[in-house]
């Protein structure tokens, strides 16, 4: 079986779907690994390292491939270059590019999206959303520390005492908890809020304060948050306002799967912050948790800096790629039976992660969304 890994094409994307370390594991599962020249050049993995690990570098990588691994979704044009009937694994952002999904169906590509891997214990080793969110949360805290015109830790110097920076993290899931842990290591005074009550103990175990707001949140399924109503969000904004205003840094990570990110910080709340404060909005790609955020841009709003990074995991590509590659191997191993690529659709992880197969869209919400657009 041939496993092909093309270079990522989105500007600024520096990660690679496969790193040399996992090539022997893929060979052990029955794959000949072909990678495009320069695949890991921006992530610290030169072509020679892939060769040494046993991969074929360069040549017609996609020709005759049985399986293709990527980090980011292909464009519809890139799907056109996949061999008909091949298997594709990667982040596929179901619902955001209907033309790309239609192209997968047309080429009879069996595709598995990391966004759809069920959040169950058995699938944790394939949870690329978590591995990349870990990187993004860590980087968000570092970015804030570098851009804040203040110290994070408390300093007692001969010239006087400097108080620690006050960091507020909204959304204490995988990324939020990493942001909290990193900001704490740097010595900041950290508080956090999440709609899931289970997050409170996790926040406290990291040495941060959990903000108890007098609010009754709807609970979602599968450990995820539910989408809250407009009344809830208005009340949340009201209750959190004073905390936002007194923070030096606010890191927002709140998300509801398949929905636009909830707006937690209104423009007026940004205006109540001290000049020199800053917001890092990790939810920028799904619409932003802050009304002022602009995706991929830095906005100076009356002296408050609002950062809306597109994908912070791509800014730390060596470890982001290493973790992602292990997620890929674990998912791929699940798709192989008796030395053949033969996904078992009775397996809930395989069935859950599948976006397209046999010329149809298997993921019901994406299928319904595409049908509603046609109608
Ligand atoms: N395999 C597994 O069992 C597994 C793997 C990863 C994560 N999880 C769990 O899934 C949960 C969420 O993971 P995630 O980080 O990918 O979630 P996510 O990226 O979908 O959301 C980030 C956080 O935003 C929070 N949020 C949503 N709406 C909010 C609002 N209005 N105000 C404040 N916060 C809001 C969510 O509760 C979540 O904690 C966590 O409990 C995590 O431990 C389980």
Image (spheres, rainbow, N blue to C red):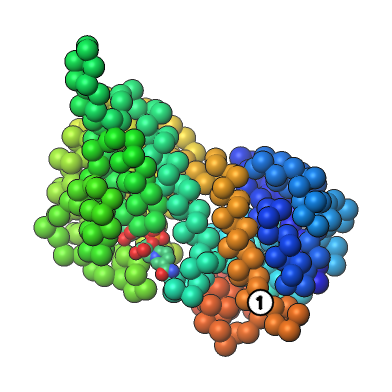
Question: Residue 19 vs residue 38: left or right?
Answer: left
Q: Secondary structure at mark 1?
A: helix
Q: Residue furthest left?
A: 214
**Residue under label 1:** 335
Which residue is located at x 74 percent, y 42 percent? 46
- 148 relative position to 239: left or right: right
Q: Residue at x 28, y 30 (%)?
A: 153
Q: How many marks?
A: 1
Does the rendering let one see residue 373?
Answer: no
> Residue at coordinates 70% horizontally, 44% vertically from top-left?
45
Q: Is residue 317 left or right of residue 124?
A: right
Residue 304 quadrant:
top left
Q: Is residue 122 above or below residue 182?
A: below
* 298 in relation to 118, above or below: above
Label 1 crowding class (10 Å Cα cut-off): few <14, some 14-19, many 20+?
some
Q: Position of residue 100 (x, y in %)?
A: 65, 62
The foreground one among 98 and 357 is 357
Q: Position of residue 271 (x, y in %)?
A: 24, 32
User: Which residue, as the protein is rendered here, is positioned at the far top?
Assistant: 159
Q: Given the current orientation, which residue lies at the most extreme bottom position?
A: 346
**Residue at point 77%, 72% (across, down):** 30
Quadrant containing ligand 1? bottom left
Q: Is residue 28 in view?
A: yes
> Residue 329: image x %, image y %?
64, 65
Task: Give the camera-side residue of 220 and 21.
Answer: 21
């Amino acid at each position: 079986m041939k496993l092909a890994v093309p270079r990522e094409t989105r500007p600024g994307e520096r990660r690679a779907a496969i790193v040399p370390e996992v090539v022997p594991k893929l060979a052990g599962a029955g794959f000949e690994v072909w990678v495009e020249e320069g695949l890991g050049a921006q992530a610290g993995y030169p072509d020679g390292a892939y060769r040494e690990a046993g991969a074929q570098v360069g040549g017609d990588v996609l020709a005759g491939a049985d399986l293709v691994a990527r980090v980011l979704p292909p464009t519809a044009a890139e799907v056109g270059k996949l061999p008909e009937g091949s298997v594709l694994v990667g982040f596929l952002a179901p619902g955001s590019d209907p033309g790309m999904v239609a192209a997968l169906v047309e080429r009879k590509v069996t595709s598995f999206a990391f966004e759809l891997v069920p959040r169950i214990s058995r699938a944790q080793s394939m949870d690329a959303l978590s591995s990349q969110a870990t990187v993004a949360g860590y980087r968000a805290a570092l970015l804030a520390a570098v851009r804040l015109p203040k110290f994070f830790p408390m300093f007692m110097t001969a010239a006087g005492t400097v108080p620690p920076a006050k960091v507020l993290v909204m959304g204490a899931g995988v990324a939020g908890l990493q942001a909290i842990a990193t900001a704490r290591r740097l010595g900041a005074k950290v508080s956090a809020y999440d709609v899931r009550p289970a997050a409170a103990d996790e926040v406290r175990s990291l040495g941060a304060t959990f903000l108890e707001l007098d609010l009754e949140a709807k609970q979602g399924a599968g450990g995820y948050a539910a989408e809250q109503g407009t009344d809830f969000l208005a009340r949340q904004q009201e209750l959190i306002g004073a905390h936002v205003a007194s923070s030096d840094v606010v890191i927002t990570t709140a998300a509801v799967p398949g929905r636009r990110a909830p707006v937690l910080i209104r423009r007026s709340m940004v205006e109540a912050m001290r000049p020199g404060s800053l917001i890092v909005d990790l939810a920028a790609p799904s619409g932003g948790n802050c009304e002022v955020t602009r995706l991929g841009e830095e906005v100076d709003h009356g002296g408050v800096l609002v950062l809306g990074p597109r994908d912070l995991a791509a800014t730390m590509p060596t470890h982001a790629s290493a973790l992602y590659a292990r997620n890929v191997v674990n998912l791929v191993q699940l798709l192989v039976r008796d030395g053949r690529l033969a996904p078992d659709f009775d397996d809930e992880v395989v069935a859950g992660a599948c976006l397209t197969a046999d010329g149809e869209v298997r993921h019901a919400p994406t299928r319904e969304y595409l049908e509603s657009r046609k109608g």
